Amino acid sequence: MNCEQANQIDLVDYLNSMGFSPSKISGENYWYLSPLHLERTASFKVNKPGNIWYDHGIGKGGKLVDFVCLYLNCQIPEALQKISASSVTANFSFHKQKAVVLQLTVDDRAIHIFSIKNPIIDPTLIGYLKQRNIDSDVANEFCREIFYKSGENTFCAIGFKNNSGGYELRSPSFKGSSSPKYVTWLDNKATSVAVFEGFFDFLSYRSIVGIQKSPTNILVLNSLSFFTRSLLLMEKHERIHLYLDNDKAGKECVTQAIQRSNKVVDESNLYKGFKDLNEWTVSLAVTQQLKQSRVIRL
C-alpha cells in the first residue's frame, strides 16, 4: 500500500474503527474531540467530501496518512504498515478513480451497548478476573458487567468507563472498546498522579495498595496514543508515577516525560522482566500477599 491508496480510505470510517465518534455533524463536516490532544470542546474537523481533517487545537491538518503519523508519532512507512493491517483496510475495494470503504466495515462491526450491570456476576468474567489476579471488590468498584451487540451477535464483557462515556471492554476472548475512545481521569484532589497504560494495570495497582489515607490522582490512558496529549495534565502534579508497559513504546514515553520534567518517577522497575504491572501480579501467588508487601511507592 502506498500513500495515494491509503489516503483514499474514508477518514470517518477509519476514525470510527479506532473508537472515535463525532461529537456533532454540521453539514459536510464531522467534529470530534481531538484524537491528538486532550480537550473538552470538539476542535478536530473532518470534511467528508474532501476526506481531509484539520485540528484547530494544534493548527495542523491533512489526509489519513498525515493523521496516522501524528497519532502514532511515527514515520510514513510505519503508518502505512499500520493502516494496511487495520480492519478498515481489510474490507475496502478499489474502483477506477478511488477506493470505496464498504459500509458494513463500520455498521456491521460497531459495538452497541444495551445493558450495564453491577456487580459483575457472570461466572466466566469472575473467573477471568481471578485469572488476572484482580480483587473482586476493586473490580466491582471501577468496572461494570457490559452486554453489547456486534452485528447480529450478543456478548458480555468487563467494562471500564472513560471520561467521554465510552467503555474499554475485556473478556477471555475479546479486547476492544466502544465509542468514543478516551482517557479515564480520577481526581482525588491529590498532589501526585499515577499513570497507567491500561485499566487492568490500574486494577492491579488498587488490588495491591488498597485504599490509601492520602490517595493519588489516577490517569488511565486506555491507549498509549493519549500519552503526549496528557503531559500537561500530568505536569500539574508535584510527582508523576509512570506505570507503563516494559516495551519500546512505553520506554519512549517515559523518556519523553523525563526529558520534560524532573517530577517523573519510572515505576516499571517494580515489574522488570514482565510486560506490565498486571502480568507481574499474575505471576505472584495471591492478592493478599501483594497487599502485605506494600511495595508500591506513593
Image (cartoon, helix red, strand yellow):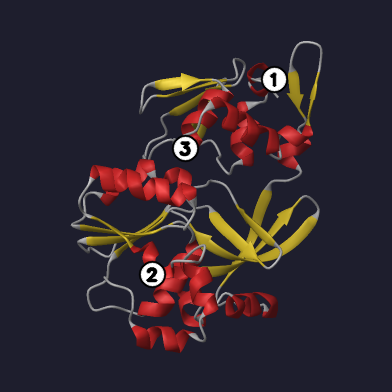
| Residue under numbered circle 3 | 35
| Residue under numbered circle 1 | 5
Image point (47%, 81%), residue name: 137
Image point (62%, 36%), residue name: 82
How far apart are the two marked residues, 2 and 3, measured between alpha carbons? Answer: 31 Å
- The amino acid at mark 2 is Leu
Apparent side of residue 177 relative to residue 242 in the rendered image (left or right): right
Residue 282 x/y as whole percent: 54, 76
Q: Residues within 10 Å of mark 1 (few under 14, many from 20)?
A: some
Q: Is residue 166 above or below residue 74?
A: below
In this view, the mark in front (2 or 3): 2
Whichever of labels 2 and 1 marks the residue nearer the N terminus, that label is: 1
Apparent side of residue 13 relative to residue 298 in the rendered image (left or right): right
| Residue under numbered circle 2 | 270
Image point (52%, 62%), residue name: 275
Apparent side of residue 87 relative to residue 197 in the rendered image (left or right): right
- Closest to the observer: 249 or 134? 249
- The amino acid at mark 1 is Gln
